[in-house]
Amino acid sequence: MNRTAMLDAVKAHGDAEWDVVIIGGGATGVGVAVDAAVRGYKTLLVEREDFGKGTSSRSTKLVHGGVRYLEQGNISLVMEALKERGLLRQNAPHLVHDLPFVVPNYEWWEAPFYGIGMKIYDLLATKYSFGKSKILSREETLERLPTISQEGLRGGVVYHDGQFDDTRLLTHLVMTAADHGATVLNYCGAVGLLRGEDGFLQGVTLEDSVSGERFNVQAKVVVNATGIFTDEVRRMAEPDVQTMVSPSQGIHLVFEKSFLRADTAIMVPRTSDGRVLFAIPWHEHTVVGTTDTPIEAPSYEPKPLEEEIEFVLETAGEYLSRKPTRDDILAIYVGIRPLVKAAGSDGSKTSALSRDHTIHIDGSGLLTIVGGKWTTYRHMAEDTVNHAATLGHLPDVACTTADLHVHGWSDATDLGHLLVYGSDAAKIRALAASSPELAQQLNPALPYLAAEVVWAAREEMAVTVEDVLSRRTRALLLNAKAAIAMAPRVAQLMAAELGHDEAWQQSQVSAFTALAQQYLPQ
């Protein structure tokens, strides 16, 4: 997967029509690209930043049905998500695995109440179950969660859900789309929509962010899959459209593994702001989140609010025997949910908005897909491509992605931190073995190797130091100070691979350092 080759392929296509052009390189857009390409449609996906730069890299790292949606009575969404959770583990076992969760009980009524709820959750999972729930004694709860607060603890309820690395999955989905013939381009934004004489869309004007060059592409169908920026693209087609998205931000705090010291997560079903709070083991660290704060407008780098940080610290401190402080925070990352605005809603209570997806076709023929959640990306893509095929008079081809192995599929479990690369891990190991300097660990606090930087630039279309440290590896989200320390070496390795000079290296290190400071408590 090479960016220069992809760009050349777009130019070589010239004025010939693409069947589907997708704007947006997050989970939804890339899912659509995979589905369309597998059906044999001529598919182009463009993303103005890096793949997953927005919401798709900033999730709670869970592939789950959504226990909270069960409480809300949204049974259909829960069943759909539980099925998709099972398909994801089947199709990407190197990236999706089972994770037990414990709901700690401190009141007499909690064990029967949550125990019954989790049994319903089990029932809805049907053949896609990840494991059976059960009520735990106090001793069993402490065995699973040795760092849980013991004062007043009565026991717990254990249930099973899925965990994943969001942008590693996204990267492998981009590679899956490319494997099946799709053309995919990061750092190439849609800056205009082209209309025919009848007023309907017939293409997109693109701008290559690297060179600044603009060019037009023709399309039978244009899909807007830009998540939190959905309304921005819709306004290109119809300047006066009513907004569809009600953005809400959620923050996550990352700590050392010792705060959880177990391979079991904690789920707090009801916090003071009405959301579920999780404390999760992830990549040898502990991730705690999330909040639900309505915001005015989306951005690529949302900032945590002071009250959000205090809320997560305070709530986590109620459940962990070692209460985390600001000094313990290794990184803070913030994501924005592209929630679909409810009819008559003022957007002030986003926790009550549905996580279902919505497909909208406006008067110009722009097909917009928005909402949903990471877990259901494949089903959302199937629904979108079905609509696109009808809208663009494309050949009627059935969706087959329910059984499609994602790039890197592997059932190996002995790959260490390279497990997230799946079958590509052997190539990275070979790359590391080819040179002593490529076998070096970039920082003692994190497991990443120099060979992974070269692989990201050579095979995964990483263009910047941020691409490597935030999304191809997860260094920035795990330990911002360590990521800053790694930046000069990463820039050096990328420059050698991509042909950049010393000035580029300095610029990249400076830009990344400024960005990474935002991931630390101020």
Image (cartoon, rainbow, N blue to C red):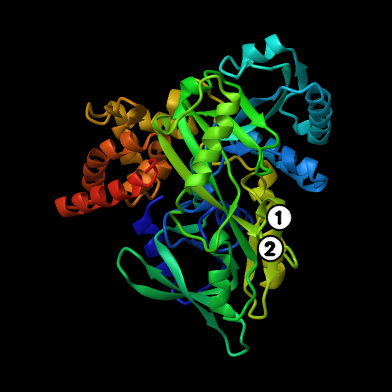
Q: Position of residue 388 (x, y in %)?
A: 67, 66
- The image quadrant of residue 255 is top left
Badge 1: how crowded within 10 Å, few (<14), some, or many (20+)? some
- In front of the other: 479 or 490: 479
Q: Which mark is residue 320?
A: none
The amino acid type of the residue labelled 2 equals: Lys
Placement of the C terminus among the 4 image quadrants:
top left
Q: Which residue is drawn at 72% across and 43% down?
A: 81
SS category of the residue bearing label 1: loop
Q: Quadrant of residue 314?
A: top right
Q: Which amino acid, by three-letter code, is at mark 1? A: Leu
List x then y, in percent, for residue 297. Answer: 52, 63
Residue drawn 33% across the image and 52% down it: 463
Q: Do the residues labelled 2 and 1 touch (CB within 8 Å)?
A: yes
On the image, the x and y values in percent for residue 350 come to 66, 54
SS category of the residue bearing label 2: loop
The crowding category of the residue bearing disc 2, from other C-alpha atoms within 10 Å (few below 14, some 14 to 19, many at least 20), is some
Q: Which of 315 and 371 is in front in this view?
A: 315
**Residue at the spot of label 1:** 353
For the residues marked 2 and 1, what is the alpha-carbon distance in whole angstroms? Answer: 7 Å
Q: Nearer the viewer, residue 351 or 506?
A: 351
Q: Who's the residue at 62% across and 82% down the image?
A: 200
Please name the residue shown 40% across and 75% down the image.
215
- Quickly name the residue at label 2: 341
Residue 93 visible to an observer of this rendering: no
